[in-house]
Amino acid sequence: MTRQQLIDLIKRKRSFLCVGLDSDITKLPECVRSYEDPVFEFNKRIIDATLPYTVAYKPNLAFYESYGIKGLVSLKRTMDYLHTKENECFVIADAKRGDIGNTSKQYAKAFFTKEGDFDFDALTVAPYMGQDSVSPFLEYEGKWVILLALTSNKGSEDFQMFENAEGMKLYQKVLTQAQNWGSEENLMFVCGATKAEKFTDIRKLAPNHFLLVPGVGAQGGSLSEVCKYGLTKDCGLLVNSSRGIIFADSSDAFDKVAGEKAMEIQQEMAGFLSAL
């Protein structure tokens, strides 16, 4: 999906919501557990209920890889289903890959091609090993790298806030340096909602790049604060909510409740978009 297609999708749905498919099998509602593939059944119902309000989905690979081949089959079936919703959603592999160049080439092939079975639109990538570990992912037309910059977890303080002799923090270096590798057409950054006070500085360094923003909802991040400092004329945000939507309810009506939660967020987002 191109940048313009993503912008058009956001405008059409009046939403910049990303639903995280962190489909922990131990938390699935009882009503889907008897299915041959309960994770896929759960994901399918969540997708059906939230699609009118959502522009992106983000399967977290850990919740699939941890169950070996069965988990990857669930992921493949989920991706096949999402591919039937062509032009209705942008799909992100939350895998946080990043290795030496020849290894990254294989990861890129795995996530970005039909030969690799999944054909995601985007992939989260760790920047720690530098340009040659990121560049292979940027070679695919219509695909996106979402580079970790300032994350929402407590441990982000350990390295990301480290300052060099010139007073530049590591996450700021990532934001500036990486723009030499990719463009606004294929490079986004992960910036956590729990660090919303940093968004003014982030926008000074990356004024037009899309930001993937985790941490809203269960992690305590504020959507209004993120929008206040992070929105651009093209929106420029994909705000993720995972547990707050997909595990909002554990009854037989879990999907209906998930849809209602997604609609509530979408309606709030529509208000912010109308002010642009």
Image (cartoon, grey):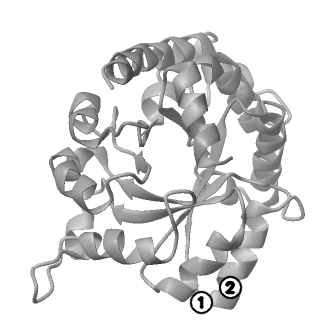
- On screen, residue 77 versus residue 208, left or right, reads right
User: Mark 2: which amino acid?
Assistant: Thr
Residue 247 x %, y %: 50, 27
Circle 1: element type: loop
- Which amino acid type is shown beneath numbered disc 1? Ile
Q: Quadrant of the C terminus?
A: top left
Using the image, determine if residue 79 lies above or below residue 119: above
> Going 78% across and 30% down the picture, which residue do you hit?
85
Judged left or right of residue 97, residue 126 is left
Numbered circle sitting on residue 122: none
Decide: is 256 above or below 184.
above
- Mark 2 neighbour density, 10 Å: few (under 14) some (14–19) many (20 or more): some
Distance in Å between CA atoms under marks 2 and 1: 6 Å
Residue 23 can be seen, yes or no: no
Residue 103's disc number? 2
The residue drawn where x is 29% and y is 31% is: 223
- Looking at this view, is 273 or 15 the one in front? 273
Dot 2 falls on a residue whose secondary structure is helix
**Point 15% across, 47% down: residue:** 197
Q: Are marks 2 and 1 in contact (CB under 8 Å)?
A: yes
Residue closer to the observer: 227 or 155: 227
Q: Residue at x 70, y 20 (%)?
A: 48
Q: Position of residue 30 (x, y in %)?
A: 65, 22
Q: Residue furthest right?
A: 115
Picture coordinates of residue 15 (x, y %)?
A: 48, 25
Which labelled disc corresponds to residue 100? 1
Kindly indicate the quadrant of the structure image that contains residue 171.
Answer: bottom left
Q: Position of residue 264 (x, y in %)?
A: 42, 13
Compared across the picture, whether 246 is left or right of 71 comes to left
